[in-house]
Image: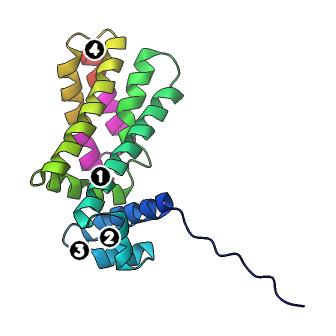
């Protein structure tokens, strides 16, 4: 009896692009910008280096796509937190702000990738645009949530609260034992209560 032949299947272009984006994020997290190169990314993705150029114009294009994908992923996480909070405007606002202190946003690997993106945003125009778009989207949604709570000057409050959340997220990511996720959430909730 002959063994049945296994059909050869090729991954879709979207799946390969996604695998390269995921590998780039992992390399940035593990090795920072200095250790992220075509060979390291392709080794992590389990593909040949030539495949990267088939899907991206180069490593800079891949890293920009990785920043955009990571931002989109964070946006989806925050949106889900709001939806899960129900219909109360204050609960929705609190959920949006405090989602940054819970997994998967507190994943240590995310810190490495995110700090690389921030560094690149200072020197690369395309990365700077992605950064500006990502943060504008976050603040716009935050403004909507603040307005639903009756906040005056929601635009300025959104900037203040975004900076507070980013600072707490960064400290929590660098040293989770310093104050903890629940304490970070409580600080943000107290600030919201005082400001809104």
| Residue behind mark 3 | 35
Q: Which residue is mark 4?
A: 196
Q: CA distance from mark 1 to mark 2?
A: 18 Å
Q: Earlier in the sequence, mark 2 or mark 4?
A: 2
Residue at the limit of the structure toward the right, as seen here:
1
Q: Specify start and end residues of the magenta stretch as a single range.
A: 166-189
For the point 32% across and 77% down, the residue is: 40
Q: Residue at x 29, y 52 (%)?
A: 67
Measure the alpha-carbon separation of dots 1 and 3. 17 Å
Q: What residue would you read off at disc 1?
A: 67
User: x, y (%) of residue 47?
Assistant: 43, 76
Looking at the image, residue 181 sits to the left or right of residue 131; the answer is right
User: In terms of sequence position, does the residue under pointer 1 or pointer 2 come before the other?
Assistant: 2
- The dot on residue 53 is 2
Determine the secondary structure under disc 1: helix
Q: Nearer the viewer, mark 2 or mark 4?
A: 2
Q: Secondary structure at mark 2?
A: helix
- Residue 17 vs residue 121, the one in the foreground: 17
In the image, is residue 162 above or below residue 11? above
Q: In terms of secondary structure, what is the magenta stretch mainly?
A: helix
| Callout in the foreground (1, 3) | 1
- 3D distance between C-alphas at marks 3 and 2: 19 Å
Does the residue at mark 3 contact the one at mark 2 (Cβ under 8 Å)?
A: no
């Amino acid at each position: 009896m002959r063994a049945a032949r296994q059909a050869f299947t090729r991954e879709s272009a979207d799946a390969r692009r996604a695998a390269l984006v995921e590998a780039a994020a992992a390399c940035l997290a593990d090795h920072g910008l200095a250790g992220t190169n075509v060979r390291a990314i392709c080794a992590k993705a389990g593909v040949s280096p030539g495949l990267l150029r088939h899907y991206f114009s180069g490593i800079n294009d891949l890293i920009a796509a990785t920043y955009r994908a990571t931002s989109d992923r964070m946006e989806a996480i925050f949106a889900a937190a709001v939806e899960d909070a129900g219909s109360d405007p204050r609960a929705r606002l609190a959920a949006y702000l405090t989602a940054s202190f819970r997994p998967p946003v507190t994943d240590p690997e995310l810190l490495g990738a995110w700090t690389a993106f921030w560094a690149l945003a200072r020197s690369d125009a395309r990365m700077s645009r992605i950064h500006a778009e990502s943060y504008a989207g976050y603040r716009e949604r935050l403004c909507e949530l603040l307005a639903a709570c009756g906040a005056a000057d929601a635009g300025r409050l959104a900037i203040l609260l975004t900076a507070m959340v980013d600072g707490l997220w960064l400290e929590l990511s660098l040293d989770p034992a310093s104050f903890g996720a629940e304490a970070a959430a409580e600080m943000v909730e107290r600030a919201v209560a005082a400001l809104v």
